[in-house]
Amino acid sequence: MKTHINFSTSEPLIIDVRETWEYALGHIQHALNIPLGELPQKMEELKGCEREIIVYCQSGGRSGRAAAYLQSVGFDKVRNGGGIGEMAMHYPVA
């Protein structure tokens, strides 16, 4: 399924890199769910995104790998948001 990404806003693009079942248990409001293992296949959909990208997971490990991967393929405004607990201090949870 194609991911819909709004390129016209200046808000950060928040990506939850946890598995789909983890996302279903609770996630940051408006976060996209792109599991870490599927990230390489979603690059075409992210192409052209100039927004800051914040990636998070359960504790920060997977999001660290996702941030490094995104930077390695040319995204320069990427930040590891850490775990969902850290993100929930700054963004509402759905």
Image (cartoon, rainbow, N blue to C red):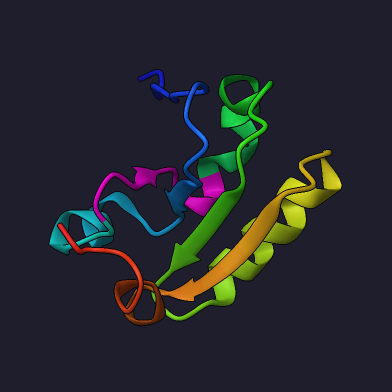
Above or below for 11 versus 66:
above
- Give the quarter of the image for residue 5: top left
Question: Is 90 colored magenta in this rendering?
Answer: no
- Front position in the image: 31 or 64: 31
Image quadrant containing the N terminus: top left
Query: Which image quarter is the C terminus in?
Result: bottom left
Does residue 85 lie above or below 7 as drawn?
A: below
Residue 16 place in picture, x, y as percent: 41, 54
**Boundaries of the magenta span:** 29-37
Q: Is residue 52 left or right of residue 58?
A: right
Q: Is residue 54 left or right of residue 50?
A: left
92 left or right of 37?
left
Name the residue at 34% across, 47% down. Answer: 31
Work out whether residue 72 or residue 93 is closer to the camera in this orientation and state it. 93
Quadrant hosting residue 84: bottom left
Q: How many marks?
A: 0
Q: Position of residue 49 (x, y in %)?
A: 63, 28
